[in-house]
Amino acid sequence: MSPFTSIEQLDAGVSDLRSALAEVEEALVALDGDPTRELLAATALSGETEERWRRADQEFRLLWKWFLAVTDLLAGATQRRGSKSSLPPAQLQSLAAELSRPAAEVLSDTPLPEGLRASGRPVSLAALLAAMTRSAQEIERVVRDTEQAWDRLVPRLAEIEASAAAVERAALDGGVRTPNDLTVARRSIGELRRQCTADPLSIHGDPVVAISEGVERAQAGVEEALRARSELDGEIASWLADLQQAIEELERARGRQRESAQKVSGGELALAGIDGAAGELQALLESLRDAAAQAAGGDRDGAARSLAAVRQRSAAVLERARSLTANAGGDLATRDELRGRLDAYRAKARAIGRAEDLQLEELYQQAIGELYSAPCDLSRCSALVVAYQRALAPGSAGNGR
C-alpha cells in the first residue's frame, strides 16, 4: 500500500525526496568539477588505485543516470500535482503509485546501486536516494584518499629530488665520485614518483624518510670527500712550497759555497753535496707536481699515494738540504774569523810592548800570508793563529828584539 494517502502526505514525501536528491546533486556537482577527480580520470593508473578508481568512476557515471532518472520522475510528478490544494482521489492515487514505484522500474535500463542489488526485495525511491548518497560518499573517499596521498608525497618528493640534485652538482663541481647512496636514492625517487603517479593508494607508511636518509648520507659523503680533497690539495701545495723554498735557499747557498770554494781549499766537496741535494729536491718537486696533476684529474687515490711517497723520501733530503744551506760558506766565515783573531792578537802584542818581537812577527807574517792567499788552507791558517796566540802567552816572550 502507498504511504501517500493524502495530498499532505504526498507533498511531504515529495519534499523529502527533493531534499535527499539535492544532497546528491550537490555531491555530484562538486565531484564533477573536482580537479583531483579529473586528474584521476586523465591518468594511466595501476594496482590498487586503478581498481578503486575503476569502481568509483563506474559508480560516478551510474550516479548521474540515477540522479537524472529520479529528477525526471520528481519533475513529472510535480507537474502533474500542480498547485491545487486538493486532488481528486484517482489523481492522488495515480501520483502516489508513481512515487511508490520500485527503484528498479524507475531506473529501467540502469542497474541499481551495488548495495541494493542483492536484497531481492523492491527498493523504494528513498532507499535509492540513500544508496546514491552513500555512492557519492564512497567516490568522494577515493578522490580524497588519492588527493591526500599526492599532497603528502609529491611536494616532499620534489624537495628530496632537489636535494639529491644539489648533492650531485656538488660532487660534479668538486670533482669527487658520486656516492652509491645517491645513486640508490635517485633510483628510489624515480620508482616512488612513478608509483605515486600511477598507484598512490598502494603507498603505505612514509617511504620518503628512507630516501631522505640516503640523500643525507650521500651529502655527508660528498662533504667528507670535498674536505679530504681540500686537505689533500692543501698538503700538496704546502709540500710544493716547502720544496720550492728549499731549492731556492739551496741555490743561494750554492752561490755562497762557490765563493767559499774559490777562496778556501776543500770547499768543492760541500759544493758537490749541494748539487746532489738540489737534484734530489728537484726530483721530489716533479713528483709532487705529478701528484697535483693526478688530483686535478680526479685520481685522488693516486695523488694521495704519490704524496705519501714524496713525504717518505722528503724528510731526509730536506734535513740534508737545510744542513748544507746552514753550513754553506762556513769556511769563508771561519777564515774571516781567523783573520779577526790574528788582528786582535797583534793589537794585544803591541799593547803589552811586544810589537817588535821577532818570533811573533815571523808567526804573524806566516799567518797573514796563508790567510790572504786563495785558496787558503784553513787547517794551516788555524794552526798558525794558534801558534801566534801561544807565543803571545805570558812567559813565552823571546829575546828577538
Image (cartoon, rainbow, N blue to C red):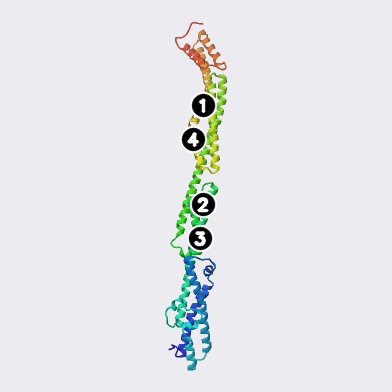
Tell me residue 373's x, y (percent).
57, 15
Sequence-earlier tag: 2 or 1: 2
User: Which residue was labeled with disc 1?
Assistant: 324
User: Which residue was labeled with disc 4?
Assistant: 311
* Residue 216 drawn above or below residue 196: above
Q: Distance between the residues labelled 1 and 3?
A: 69 Å
- Report if the CB atoms under discs 4 and 3 are less than 8 Å apart: no
SS label for mark 2:
helix
Question: Residue 227, can we see it?
Answer: yes
Tag nearer the camera, 2 or 1: 2
* 34, 345: nearer the viewer: 34
User: Which residue was labeled with disc 3?
Assistant: 193
| Numbered circle sitting on residue 275 | none
Q: Distance between the residues labelled 4 and 3?
A: 50 Å
- Report if the CB atoms under discs 1 and 4 are less than 8 Å apart: no
- Report if the CB atoms under discs 1 and 3 are less than 8 Å apart: no
| Numbered circle sitting on residue 167 | 2
Sequence-earlier tag: 1 or 4: 4
- Report if the CB atoms under discs 4 and 2 are less than 8 Å apart: no
Sequence-earlier tag: 4 or 3: 3
Sequence-earlier tag: 1 or 3: 3
Other-residue count near label 1 (Cα within 10 Å), few / some / many at <14 / 14–19 / ≥20: many
Tell me residue 134's x, y (percent).
45, 75
